[in-house]
Image (tube, rainbow, N blue to C red):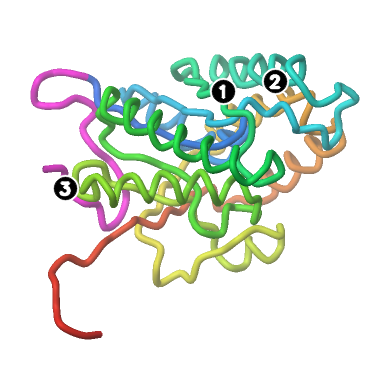
Amino acid sequence: MRKLLPFLILFAAFSASGQKKTLLAIFPHSDDESTVAEVLIKYSELGYRVQVITATDGRYGTRITKVPAGEELARLRKEESLCAAKKLGIEEPIFFGIERLDTLIGVGKYFAEHKRLLKLLKEKISELDPEFIITFGPDGDTSHSEHIVTGAAVTELIIREGWVEKYPLYYVAWPKALGEASDLGYVHEKYMNVRIDYSQALEDRALEIMPCYVTQFTPEEIKEDREKKIADRSNVAYFRQLVVKKGLRNNF
């Protein structure tokens, strides 16, 4: 059974059998990996196999692009994520190709897609056998519905299958000051379990992936994001671990 981590995650990169250990990050969209880019690079350099799963094909991500929703946009977003993975030095992402994870596709179709997501997650997590998993928590990072649904599906599966100890699950956790300043969901500091520090050089490498996402961010947004991150010299990422209390009692 894997040991749960109360503080900084620094595992040996290889299992007792000599196999590379795997960090698995599960997100709904191509570009969500940018949220933890520094952590992905760090663990890749520590010798881990770093694998990202992207649940949806992103065909409706038309916020700034003139490319209409549909197959062509989905193809472009896949290429953007492949570009980012190459710059990060991690494995090529696994794309589930789910059309959408909200009820805008219809309630019945959403139910079917949610079930398909759970099935694919069960298959891939079992196959990859990760040392730990990263995803979005209940806040969905930005309160994005598909962020919330994807994180909840991962949590649902881990609890349903009795995998809480087997595959430790960590949610992206922003401190209050940063959350309020950047309109992100945040976590009270007493519930943060993991702090991962990274160098400025590593942050500079992480920022190099942003121009990959030409359909999702304007040059002005990329410039502003870069300036904010360079100005913030703390260079730390936080996570909150899913912990489930076991044991049955007769009342609350």
Secondary structure found at label 2:
helix
Q: Check the picture and name the quadrant holding the C terminus.
A: bottom left
Of the numbered discs 2 and 1, the one sitting upstream in the chain is 2
Q: Look at 46% across and 34% down and name the residue there.
A: 117
| Magenta stretch: includes residue 50 | no
Q: Residue 118, how many percent across, how many down?
A: 40, 37
Q: Check the picture and name the quadrant holding the N terminus.
A: top left
The dot on residue 3 is 3
Secondary structure found at label 3:
loop
Tags 3 and 2 touching, CB below 8 Å = no
Q: Residue 95, how many percent across, how many down?
A: 52, 21
Magenta segment boundaries in residue numbering? 1-19
Q: Residue tagged by mark 2?
A: 74
Disc 3 marks which amino acid? Lys
Type of secondary structure dominating the magenta stretch: loop
Decide which of 47, 112 is in the foreground and name it.
112
Tags 2 and 1 touching, CB below 8 Å = yes
Disc 2 marks which amino acid? Ala
Give the quarter of the image for residue 225. top right
Of the numbered discs 3 and 2, the one sitting upstream in the chain is 3
